[in-house]
Image: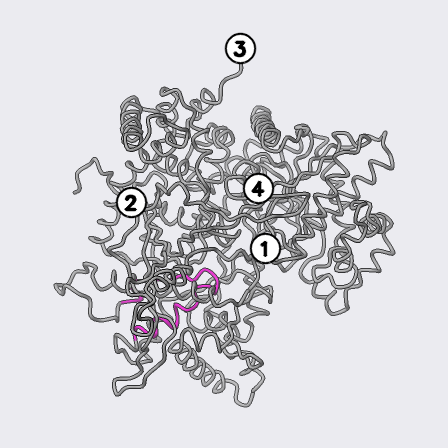
Amino acid sequence: MSKPLSDHEKRKQISVRGIAGLGDVVEIKKSFNRHLHFTLVKDRNVATPRDYYFALAHTVRDHLVGRWIRTQQYYYEKDPKRIHYLSLEFYMGRTLQNTMINLGLQNACDEAIYQLGLDLEELEEIEEDAGLGNGGLGRLAACFLDSMASLGLAAYGYGIRYEFGIFNQKITNGWQIEEADDWLRYGNPWEKARPEYMLPVHFYGRVEHTHEGPKWVDTQVVLAMPYDTPVPGYKNNTVNTMRLWSAKAPNDFNLQEFNVGDYIQAVLDRNLAENISRVLYPNDNFFEGKELRLKQEYFVVAATLQDIIRRFKSSKFGCRDPVRTSFETFPEKVAIQLNDTHPALAIPELMRILVDIERLDWEKAWEITTKTCAYTNHTVLPEALERWPVYMFEKLLPRHLQIVYEINRQHLDRVAALYPGDSDRLRRMSLIEEGDPKRINMAHLCVVGSHAVNGVARIHSDIVKTTVFKDFCDIEPEKFQNKTNGITPRRWLLLCNPGLADIIAEKIGDDFLTDLFQLKKLSDFVDDEMFIRDVAKVKQENKLKFAAYLENEYKVKINPESIFDIQVKRIHEYKRQLLNCLHVITLYNRIKKEPNKKFVPRTVMIGGKAAPGYHMAKMIIKLFTSVGEVVNHDPVVGDRLKVIFLENYRVSLAEKVIPAADLSEQISTAGTEASGTGNMKFMLNGALTIGTMDGANVEMAEEAGEENLFIFGMRVEDVEAMDKKGYNAKEYYERLPELKQVMDQISTGFFSPKEPGLFKDIVNMLMNHDRFKVFADYEAYISCQEKVNELYRNPKEWTKKVIRNIAASGKFSSDRTIAEYAREIWGVEPSDVKIPPPNEPRE
């Protein structure tokens, strides 16, 4: 038998990663050595692995720069409508490998690095994740940037350059401990500071009424410094820009008249201004009404709008005027997409600029604003909706408060004209919620101030129209749309699962990477013995590789023959990691009850971060790790059941775990998960889904056939019926002996013998006030998991279902999602024009 191929040899055979041309390899080696030399000449004479990583990053970056400049030049010449995606989160992960792939350089770099006696994968592991997001919303923004560039849209991502991203999670004695994510410690080779575009942002102050209209005066100024990161499209020579703002104190900060004499303190106080971009708020699907967060939201919006207007005024546009003076054409040239309500202040801020500074009349300004802005809703959970206290607004943004009041006055006048005497409707639809304190409902502001409002999966968009925004939909139904989320197949297939990408390309060519619907062609191979074997083999290799990674990192040994049963996402009650937990304990009890029975072996893995202030989420982690302590050390169980908490789940870990999964857990209570995108990643990477009819699971089942997913549990209608009738957890506890046993074990300290009452809060919640009805779906979930075991016993039938799922996952490309936004919201056409590369003369 020939000796097994090295990782490098294996990678060389993967055709979809580009050809390693001899010229390219020589060029890359030369460039690498040059960068390494100049790095080292400066201070040291011994290179560390990190030096090698930076040398490679700079080498790859050199290939981007020419295309980046040329793309921006091309936009200046052609003056297309520009798309501005505003988000407080961009969960980008690592950049090196994605850039090599999109530039078609991966195999050339691999070969060059190999010839220099280094290993590419080892260098890739040195890069820090850019963790500027919490979860789905921030990762969606990152996938969207990739797709917008790959579809040739003139698009810009705008956000905040947080000095500290999502915290690093350590698990100590089964508890989550947070550590600051100092991701910029060694520098970031992918960003370019642009001090020449620095802009002022104003806070506080007061409004003066002058004969020329209102003036916002006596403000405090913070400067917004832009940092640009290139966003390459897939092999189309387009390179767009993500511009992230960093807060800087002006040089006269706190040195004005009132502070005379305390120069030292004044300079130290610069930190106060610069704290605005210090840290990402670590809440997912939860609103925390802190002043610093409101400052962050206004900071990104104010800097971005100035930037957009500067670009609009100075762009070349077929008339001789050196500056655009009229805003008539603004909505024809500018689209602003609000990623949730976090950048909602764009609406009053654009109004302020148009009315107070550009001196447009209110009606014209409002027409321009609504035609320009569009809003994406990401959740229907009431605790996640942003409702800012009026007093905070009044202090921080006094002029914006006046503008919001005027928007509300005119809005309520329109409603009152349509529904005379319906004061209850006026109260429900107002942007201002009466109470103590009075609050501004940012979702209502977004709906009123946008020409399009969309949900992120069909079921979610329907819920939005029939519940949260029903009153608004009654008046303007044409405003409401659906845009089912998607994921980029470049990162989430080609990058993370090259083995699978390669066997797919062997069968159907590699066009699927830019047109994922082509995966439908795999349906022809569902019964192809060779293909079935190849798909199973790739999955097995991925499982072995991940098992080796776990053994390396966490010293845990797992059985690679077992079902890899995986639930990775933020820890939240609505996502029901507890239901998964109850299943694990049930499985354990069944093994203990009949130790000699044949069980299908499982490795159950849960990963995800809990918001630092979310007590219940932290208890859920502690429960799961405590169950693991018992299960993993019980000799009776052996390797039939292992329970592993995946520490510090993040983009780069997702890229390792998802390709290795057999079973994807998507088990939120129906009607609570807006879409989910992890579900799509698992489907594309050859896992089967166990899930409820919630979010995009509904459309996944529609695409693949419900019989090819493990669907269980209540539908939205059942949940609504139960809410009417009243959910009684005790009824299930009394009726289901296995559930009763599990709950009794948790509450009597079977999993916490040193502290029997440790999990009383979880037990109390589940028994007495569980908003997400875990027990109501327990029985259906357990029996559905038995069907999973049954199918896994038949590897060939299992793999056929896997192939049907992959073949049906084409809809869930973010390219499809973005093409829909482009045509139906932004009014632009995706383009497959390939900008000529930097080495070719322009026409």
Residue placed under numbered mark 2 in the picture: 833
Q: Secondary structure at mark 3?
A: loop
As measured in the structure, the alpha-carbon distance from the residue carrying label 3 to the one carrying label 1 is: 50 Å
Q: Nearer the viewer, residue 263 or 143?
A: 263
Residue placed under numbered mark 1 in the picture: 611
Q: Residue 745 at what x, y percent from top left? A: 83, 48
Q: Residues within 10 Å of mark 4 (few under 14, many from 20)?
A: many
Name the residue: 43% across, 81% down: 405
Are the two marked residues, 4 and 2, in contact with CB atoms closer than 8 angstroms?
no
Which mark is on residue 683? 4
Q: Amino acid at mark 4?
A: Met
Q: Which of pointers 3 and 4 lies earlier in the amino acid sequence?
A: 3
Q: Which of pointers 4 and 1 lies earlier in the amino acid sequence?
A: 1
Q: Quadrant of the C terminus?
A: top left
Q: Is residue 304 visible?
A: no
As measured in the structure, the alpha-carbon distance from the residue carrying label 2 to the one carrying label 1 is: 44 Å
Q: Is residue 130 above or below residue 281?
A: above
Task: Judge from the rendering whether residue 594 lies leftward or rightward of residue 164; answer left or right.
Answer: right
Q: Secondary structure at mark 2?
A: loop
| Range covered by the magenta-colored residues | 330-354
Within the image, what quadrant is residue 23 found in? top left
Q: Nearer the viewer, residue 810 or 192?
A: 192
Q: Residues within 10 Å of mark 2 (few under 14, many from 20)?
A: few
Residue placed under numbered mark 3 in the picture: 2
Q: Amino acid at mark 2?
A: Val
Q: Residue 166 at what x, y percent from top left? A: 51, 50
Q: Secondary structure at mark 1?
A: loop
Q: Which of pointers 2 and 3 lies earlier in the amino acid sequence?
A: 3
337 in the magenta segment = yes
Q: Is residue 2 visible?
A: yes
Task: Judge from the rendering whether residue 418 lies leftward or rightward of residue 583; answer left or right.
Answer: left
Task: Judge from the rendering whether residue 560 lies leftward or rightward of residue 409; answer left or right.
Answer: right
